[in-house]
Every structure is written in structure tokens, then in C-alpha cells.
Amino acid sequence: MDEIIKEFLTESLEGLDQLDTKFVTLEQNPDDRDTLAGIFRTVHTIKGTCGFLGFSRLEKLTHAGENLLSLLRDGKLSFNQEIATALLAMLDAVRTILSEVERTETDGEEDYPALIETLHRLKEGGGVAPPPTPPAKTAPSPTPSTTEAVPSPVVAPPPHLPPVNVIPPPPKPADPAPQAVITPVAALPEPAPIIQEHPVAGPAPTASPPAVADSSIRVDVPLLDKLMNLVGELVLARNQILEYTILQENPPLQAASQRLNLITSELQEGIMRTRMQPINNIWAKFPRIVRDLALSCDKQVRVIMEGKETELDKSLIEAMKDPLTHLVRNAVDHGVELPAVRRSAGKPEEGCLLMRAYHEGGQVHIEIADDGAGINPIKLRNKALERGLITPERAGTMSDQDLRRLIFLAGFSTAEKITNISGRGVGMDVVKTNIEKIGGVIDLESELGRGSTFKIRIPLTLAIVPALIITSGGERFAIPQVNLLELIRINEEQRGVAIEYVHSNPVYRLRGKLLPIVHLNRELELVAGHSNAVNIVVLQAGQHQFGLVVDQINDTQEIVVKPLDKVLQDIPVFAGATIMGDGRVALILDVLGIAQQARILSESHDHNVAAQQREARDRDGERQTLLLVRSPGNGRLAIPLAPVSRLEEFPADQVESAGEVDVIQYRGQILPLIRLKDILGERRTADRLAHAESDVPTSDLLEVIVFGDGARRVGLAVDEIIDIVQDVFEIKGRSTRSGVAGTLVIQNRVTELFDVQGFLHQVEPLLALAEEA
């Protein structure tokens, strides 16, 4: 059954259960307006939801009851026994229809015309013929554990009468008992209760699964909070006991501790799941919202959802409803262009709204991205100046990203006119405030003409997660396993050659790819411990991987995440804290924050609209990894990384000569050296030469790119290695000199593409010479 229908049945049946008591109370006190208002709200909610789900018969019936209740609530009608009888009959009919919905996911075939007509007459002030006896239950309500049973001829009404009728003309003194068709809500002492179903063809099943209303229970969130805190403390106690029993040679104690470990783990998982809900619970309504908004704005927008199964704490789900709704409405209204505008810009007429959720770094990340026009920072600056939100002096020093963040200021809006969707300037600042109330952060990325992405990070206020425990600088830290890829240990003999350097930045060659290296002691300013080996923890931060060098790798265990105090929340490298088995506190590392602090990636990292467009281009072209170096003349040269075997640095005084060839002793062999300027040729003017030479830094180190394997190796000496880039590159221009295959645009700069094949063909004799040596 669809989750929405399940939720509808649960809420509706709970509401109906409360109405039975409210109607009895109302008969005793007909002027109780609060009770009437509560009854009206319940019926109104059922009517609105069943209309949305397409249950037209149920909607028609509840609409008739709602109209009558509306007049009672407003004091235009007086509550009496006849009205109470009709409304109670309506509730019984609603229960019957809900039972049919639960059984078949449809609202059946019965329209209840007589009951609806009675409700209409009562609304107009008319009456009904009083029944021979006031409605009374002939039997207690059935047990909650049964939803369907074989109909009993004792309580079944004549086949030609509807199961609930306000004016039944029963031939027998026994009441047709409309209560006999209600969905079970109260306990019945008999082991096999009898339930009247709506007459249907064929025998009813003898057994059925539990009703939807019986398969769930509503629990107050504060009680769940208390249970979570208790199970967190239990996990900490479990960790302490396990750490103690490891040191004891007591088999019974160890067996008992292992049993405690198992039970605690299962209890912990169960308690955590009681508070966790998939984000799809609030996302499910957005396609409908986007559809309606797109129609009202004459736009075409489709919704793509990723990570719908990502679970959030119940309190976070509730807190995120309004901010996410506003962001989605904003994206459709402001972000996505009209079809004609998109067509003229070379885009598909249908816009795309991407909603994405995932866990990373001990946080929940939510992204709302559109492929619309983007946010113009100049327009934002002018609006802010016009409204006096910033000074001209400050505007002159603000970057484009700073200008885009102006939309989070109170009262700021760029809408040309006020509509029912936007333009009042009370939106983004409220979104930011609400997210910050739950300890979250919202940021914006936008590219003019490409779209905008709002990124929300919500810290886990309390959770139990598996983590890797490490030691560095004499302190213990925890790394969430969600970020952990693998562990590497480099022994003392290999540590001298395992870590290489690219432009003074340490890297490790992991299965043919260069892995950036970050030293935790250096980033946290800790005193390095003494270790003969190098321990590298390979971590994932967004789309990027890097290696974190630590002093010691301890073990893995489940930890309770405790939030940091407000004075420490601004430290980007920590996501929280936990209490270890020995009672000491260990800080939890924020992998993303460490990567940003170490400049492995910027704050404006992956998973934005531009990245998706790059992925689309990847499907049409081949992704390449290029090594950027500085070429003579202060230019830039891109060298395909695939044929490169190593990057090395040599002292300049180690270069020797063998005839007319420069060589260097390298790993027990003679490595021929070719200088890049000799390959590219000398076709520069004297002025360019002088300018280039003035820009070349003098260094005692020689940066060399090694091609080939084994004995067939050759080194290409370059002035400077700048960067390594990976993307789909398109050649924009032709070759301008020897050694160059064409020109590209990389990082917004014109870059020459090195002719690797021509170079290797040219140095083939040197490769043979090196092999002979």
C-alpha cells in the first residue's frame, strides 16, 4: 500500500475514534463550541485528503457532513439528537469506506445517497422521522487485531438496506446497529469478534493482516528524546564494559559482556529507527507543488529527486518543511526561465529542479538546484544599494559570491512585482533563520545562465554511528566510517619514495592516481608522534579523495555523537564529540572541513548544477586527466597524464652529460633528460625571452616528468608543475609550434596541448640508449 494512503488511514481512524467521545460530550453540552470546532476540523481534514487521493465517494459523504458541522460551529443550527444520530451514522459510514480503502485501496461502490440526503435536509433546517429507538450499540467494538471477519447473520441488516441508514425501517425490534460496521477501535473480550462488512460478492476472507491503524502507534517526541538519551548512555556503558572485559581472563564475564553487546546494539538500532524518517515524507508533496506553480507561471519544470531514502530525525523533518517549500517555490518562480527564453538560450524548454539529500561528515546535506538563469550579482548589488542595505564602499569590496549571499538579508527581494508566490522580501531571511535554529547552515552557489544551488547542512544533534578511532599527536579522534574508503600502511623502507611531491604538495600514487596527502598533526598543530611507518586513512569528501596521515590507527567502534558547545561550533574540522570506553572525550573529525582547511577542495565543492552538466558532457566525450606545467614564455602547457609514470624532483647539480645528452642517475639506471624548451623550439622575440626569463624563479631543484617503465624511461624537465586537472577538453585552436598538438582553454586560460606521441617518437633513440645502459 502507498505510504500516503497508510498515513491517511492511520490519521483518519485516530480522528474518528476521538469523535465518538466528542459527540457523547456534545449531546450533554450542545453549546460547547470548542468541541464542535474540533469535530469540524477532523471531518474537514478527512474530506480534503480523500479528495487529493481521489476517493470521490468518501469526499462527497464527508463534504455533506462538513456543511452541517459548519453551521453548527457557527451557531446557525442547534445541536440535537436527530443531528447527532445523523452525524454518528456518517462516522460509521466513513469507517466502512476506510475499511474498504484499506482492503482494496478504493472507496468501494456504495454512495450512501439516503444518508447524504438526510445530512442535506438537516443542514437546511429540516428534520427526519425519528427512529423507533435511539441509536445504540448492540455489541461492543471489536478488537484492534481484526479488520475483517465472516459476516454474522445475527447482526446483518436486510440485504436491500444500506449498512448505515439514518431512518431505517427495521422489521425487527433489534437496531440495525450501524456501529457494527465501524473499523475496530476498542478491545472486545470475545476471542472471535463479529464485524459487519459492506455487502460484497463472494465470501469474506477468514484471516487478514492487521489493520493499518493497529500496526502503528503515535508516541510523543519528548519520550523518544528521553529514550534516545538513555540508549546513548547505555552504549557508552557498554563500551566501557567491553574495554574492561578485554583485559580480564574470565570466560563467563566475557560471554555476558558479548551478550550485552548484542542486545544493546539491537536495542540501539530499534530506538534510533523510531525517530528516523525518510526525507521523502516531506518531498512527496513537492512534485505537485512544482506542477501547480509551473502551470500558474506558464513554465515547464520537471523534478528529479536523489536520496529520497535519506533518513532524518523526526524533529528535523518537521523543522525543514517550510524552508524547503520556500526554496522549491523560489526555484520555480525566480530560477527557471519561460520556455521561449530557454529556447533562445539553447536550453530545453523544460526546466529541471534537482532535489538531493545525503549523509556526509556527520551531517545531513540537502541540495535544491535548478538549471535556470542563475543569480546576477550585479543586479543584487544594485538592489542592495538602492534599498540602503549596504554601503557603496562595502559593495566595491564584495566578491560575486558575497553579493549573491545578499538574498539572505531581511527584506531583500529582486522581484519586479509582488505576487502570491514571491516579491514581499520576507522569504530567504526566514529560511536562513529557521535552518540556523536547528544548528544548520545554508549557502548558495550560482552561475549566470547555468542555474543555482542552495546547499543546506544540518548537524546530527544526537546519533550513534560507526567510526574509526585513530591517535595523532597523543590525542584520540573519531572518523565517521561513512567517509572511510581504505587504510594504507607504508613501512619504513618505502616511506622515503612512497610520498611524492607535486609543486611542493605531497601526493601518494594509489593505483595509478595521485592522491593528495594531508597531515593531521600539521592541520591541528599537534606534536607529531614517533612512528617508523606511515599510516594513511583514505577518505572521501564529496567527489574528492585524499589521504589523511595519522600517527596510529586503533580500531572501529560505535560512538555516540554529542554536539559541540556553541563556542566550538565555528571550528570547521570537528563535527562533534564522543565519550570513549575509558571515560575520556574524543573529538569527531569533520572530513569535509579538514579537506577545505587543507585546500584539497574549496567550500564551493561538487554536486552542483555545473557538475551535472560536466557529467552530461562526459557522456558525449572522453574525460582526460592533464598535468599543467609552465612553459617557456610564462605560458601554460597541458600534458596528458596517462603515459606519465612518475613525477620527480632532483637537485640541479646531479645532472650529468653523456655526449650531447643530459642524464641523471635514477633508481640504478641512467635516465636521459630532455628540457621542455628544447622540444618547443626557440621562436620567441628578444622581448618575450627577456620577460619570460625574468619570471622564471631560480631554484636548486629540477622538476622532471618521467615517461616509460622499466629501463625504457626518459625524463622531461619543466620549469614548474602547476596543477592536475580532469575534465572533457575540446581543442579550440591549431598547433602554433613544434611539440604542440593544439590549444585548449583550461581554468579560463589559453593552454597549449603537449604532443606526447610526437615527443615519444622523437626520443625513441634515447629510450633505446637507456635500455642498453
Image (cartoon, rainbow, N blue to C red):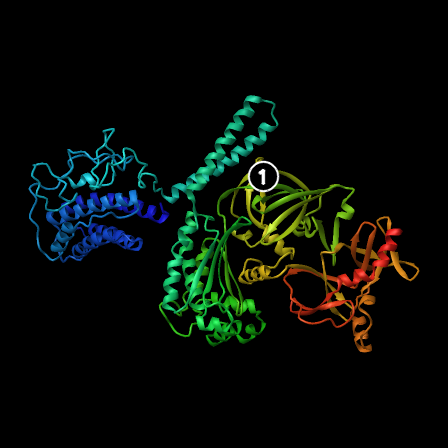
Q: Nearer the viewer, residue 122 or 192?
A: 192
Q: Is residue 56 left or right of residue 376?
A: left
Q: Is residue 566 visible?
A: yes
Q: Nearer the viewer, residue 617 or 297?
A: 617
Toward which corner of the image does residue 717 lie, by quadrant? bottom right
Residue 751 position, x and y percent, is 70, 68
Q: Which quadrant of the rendered structure holds the N terminus?
A: top left
Determine the secondary structure under disc 1: loop
Q: Residue at x 16, y 41 (%)?
A: 178
Q: Residue at x 39, y 68 (%)?
A: 422
Residue 454 position, x and y percent, is 49, 61
Q: Residue at x 10, y 56 (%)?
A: 125
* Label 1: how many Cα within 10 Å (few below 14, some 14–19, many 20+): few
Q: Check the image and name the residue furthest to the right.
A: 659
Residue 208 position, x and y percent, is 30, 36
Q: Is residue 451 above or below residue 77?
A: below
Count all numbered tags in the image, as a single digit.
Answer: 1
Residue 367 position, x and y percent, is 49, 57
Q: Check the image and name the residue furthest to the front.
A: 202
Q: In the rendered image, which residue does mark 1 sit on? A: 584
Q: Is residue 603 visible?
A: no
Q: Is residue 77 left or right of residue 291?
A: left
Q: Amino acid at mark 1?
A: Arg
